Amino acid sequence: MAAEIQPKPLTRKPILLQRVEGSQDVVNMAVIVPKEEGVISVSEDRTVRVWLKRDSGQYWPSVYHVMPSPCSCMSFNPETRRLSIGLDNGTISEFILSEDYNKMTPMKNYQAHQSRVTMILFVLELEWVLSTGQDKQFAWHCSESGQRLGGYRTSAVASGLQFDVETRHVFIGDHSGQVTILKLEQENCTLVTTFRGHTGGVTALCWDPVQRVLFSGSSDHSVIMWDIGGRKGTAIELQGHNDKIQALSYAQHTRQLISCGSDGGIVIWNMDVERQETPEWLDSDSCQKCDQPFFWNFKQMWDSRKISLRQHHCRKCGKAVCGKCSSKRSSIPLMGFEFEVRVCDSCHEAITDEERAPTATFHDSKHNIVHVHFDATRGWLLTSGTDKVIKLWDMTPVVS
């Protein structure tokens, strides 16, 4: 009698819908056109392209426009079809797209920065264009008059920019690892606060105006969730990438965070769980479990005639421990450690299987991602990579 074959459980993963190819250089930013089978992209090859899906099922450019300088970033407002493009020469160029997305009409240019524009945001409610540049300047302009309203010098080149319309707070993340919060008025700004949590530069920001939470991604491979609205200074660390974070997007309706890295990884984090802050690492001259001296503690080493040891830290309790007392590894997903990390032996015994249950899923985009855009209405994710390819993914199997 043949053994009964049990069906394997289906692995839920993103479905690749389309590859959009044709750019001669890296596509620095691209967006999915809402309610259309279309994509808008800007590239280092100086081109702005509007790709529409044809009857053949392939995406072909309906607009192909060459700019005077490489295109570094963009912001698209679907309601007004206003397209703002940041250039390598510091200029922001504004266009209006036709209803059928077959024509692009120039509107105005802003001489916004002295060098490459790094980020742009168009705020329809206030008619403002916010931008950052490699000149370490944050600036905002009136989109009606084109007039510069104000500016602020950042501590380093900014690479993340988010805005809260209700409070008029702008969040700026820079290469030094600092996040700056400014309060904007019509013609001036006030510094609210600055904070740091990353050991590398901030590479991406994402703001959730409903939960009032800011996510920051970094070259240190981590994501930090800052509880701005809670006013308690809570910061939750998420470790799930093997290379720097390149882009973040948040699905509000499912409370899931999408983080993408230059390693090609797409990580979907469940943020609808009660997460825990990682503990501060404690200082000690000897192991806080067995009291063996660490290698710099010459006095105790001499008095006790013991060989000195290297210091480690338990990621669960934060205690300073020796290698012998922290020989075990464990994932601690609720603390953001989806990979196994060093824990002391007593914490390893205390961590339950339930606490080891993953709170994130991991997927491979098979290209080094530089930018993402998530269309929550359809559940589609756009990724652009260093391979000059744009990929469109159906994320509904994993973002739900």
Image (cartoon, rainbow, N blue to C red):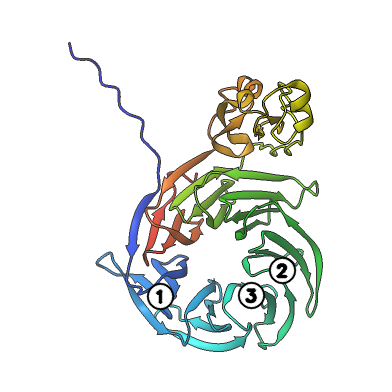
Q: Residue at x 64, y 44 (%)?
A: 237
Name the mark nearer the viewer: 2 or 3.
Answer: 2
Of 358 and 218, the residue lying toward us: 218
Element on which disc 3 rests = strand
Report the side of 281 relative to 269 (left or right). right
Report the side of 65 relative to 305 (left or right). left
Residue 311 position in % (x across, y down): 67, 34
Q: Residue at x 44, y 72 (%)?
A: 40
Element on which disc 2 rests = loop
**Amino acid carrying mark 3 in the image:** Ser
* Between discs 2 and 1, the one toward the N terminus: 1
Element on which disc 1 rests = strand
- Marks 2/1 in contact by CB < 8 Å: the verdict is no
Residue 46 position in % (x across, y down): 43, 81
Residue 207 position in % (x across, y down): 65, 57
**Amino acid carrying mark 1 in the image:** Val
The residue labelled by disc 1 is 50
The residue labelled by disc 2 is 155
Of 373 and 328, the residue lying toward us: 328
